[in-house]
Amino acid sequence: MSIRSTNPDDRLKIHTARLSVISNSGLVILKLFAGLLSGSISIVSEAIHSGMDLMAAVIAFFSVRISGKPPDRDHPYGHGKYENISGVVEALLIVVASAWIIFEAWGKLLHPSPLRNQYLGAAVMLISALVNLIISRRLYAVAKKTDSVALEADALHLKTDVYTSAGVGVGLLLIELTGISIIDPLIALGVASIILFEASTLLKKAYKPLLDTCLPETDIEQIRNIIQYHMQGCIRIHQFRTRKAGPRKYVDFHLEVPGSMSVSDAHGLCDRIEDDIQKHLGEVDINIHIEPCAMQKTEGQDGNTGTLTNKVGDDIT
């Protein structure tokens, strides 16, 4: 089965992920060349950082291609979680890269060595920062438009690279001006610290949907308001559940309606609720189970039972 998608958002994600792969490939080669010429561990650490960015970009590229596939017999809920898995893998790669940088930087602290071609290294780092600034902004824009955790993860990699590359470039200039070579491994340790923090942030965001955690409270509140807007007669919802897989959100709940409501009217009510939720929340898979609403008895002066009551959202948590 082809993994190509006809969805415009999926095609946009694939093209953007491909752009990240191309830019990171060029930067890895450029940084390695500058690092070997200068003998700078901070430049080599940045080359490793970009190498991890390249691996992350490749993973993101394939994950957005696969996640765009429609549901099939083996994956009836679609393939959205491939993006979350890619985010977890990317975070673990960052941890490995930072551990290597710390090991090498510690060795340079214990046994410092003079650097060469600092101006060349600084120029390469500043060019890298500029390129990654442009690409990361593009990735963030597409990630926001398509709600892609894989592209957001890739954008986070490159955004961090902007700061670390600029820091390394400035550090190399300081070494040239001051002659203090220990600045180089100290900068490398700073780079490692930043990308470790990046890894923890990414891991938390990517891993939570794999555990089927609920949607954000803002989304749940919006769903509550939509149901309230369409409420008629006696309506109560219970067994309300939400989760997310990649960019796709899932909502299901039981909806109690008046027992006298026809099947056609109940179906029309569900359609209106579903359309309104998708209008406000985007790509949502909604499953509503209709039940007859029980009569609530209230004792009146003549001893007759009372009327149906409106009750919405008591079981939304």
Image (cartoon, grey):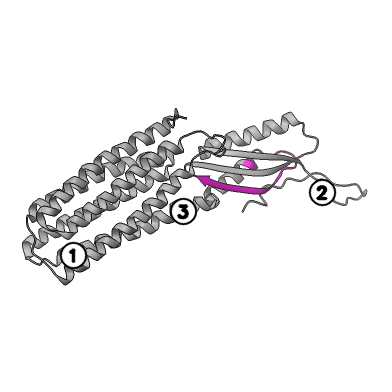
Q: Is residue 122 visible?
A: no
Q: Is residue 262 visible?
A: yes
Residue 256 at what x, y percent from top left?
73, 42
Assess disc 3: are there few (<14), some (14-19) or many (≥20) residues with their C-alpha within 10 Å of its C-alpha: some
Disc 2 marks which amino acid? Gln
Is 299 situated left or right of 148 in this image?
A: right
Residue 202 at what x, y percent from top left?
39, 54
Marking on residue 207:
3
Assess disc 1: are there few (<14), some (14-19) or many (≥20) residues with their C-alpha within 10 Å of its C-alpha: many
Image: magenta residue range? 227-245
**N-terminal-most mark, 1 or 3:** 1
Residues at marks 2 and 3, CA–CA distance in whole angstroms: 43 Å
The quarter of the displayed image where residue 108 is located: bottom left
Q: Secondary structure at mark 1?
A: helix
Is 3 situated left or right of 22 in this image?
A: right
**N-terminal-most mark, 2 or 3:** 3
Q: Nearer the viewer, mark 2 or mark 3?
A: 3
**Is residue 237 inside the magenta stretch?**
yes
Residue in view at x 31 percent, y 47 percent: 55
Residue in view at x 17 percent, y 50 percent: 32
> Which residue is labeled 2 in the image?
296
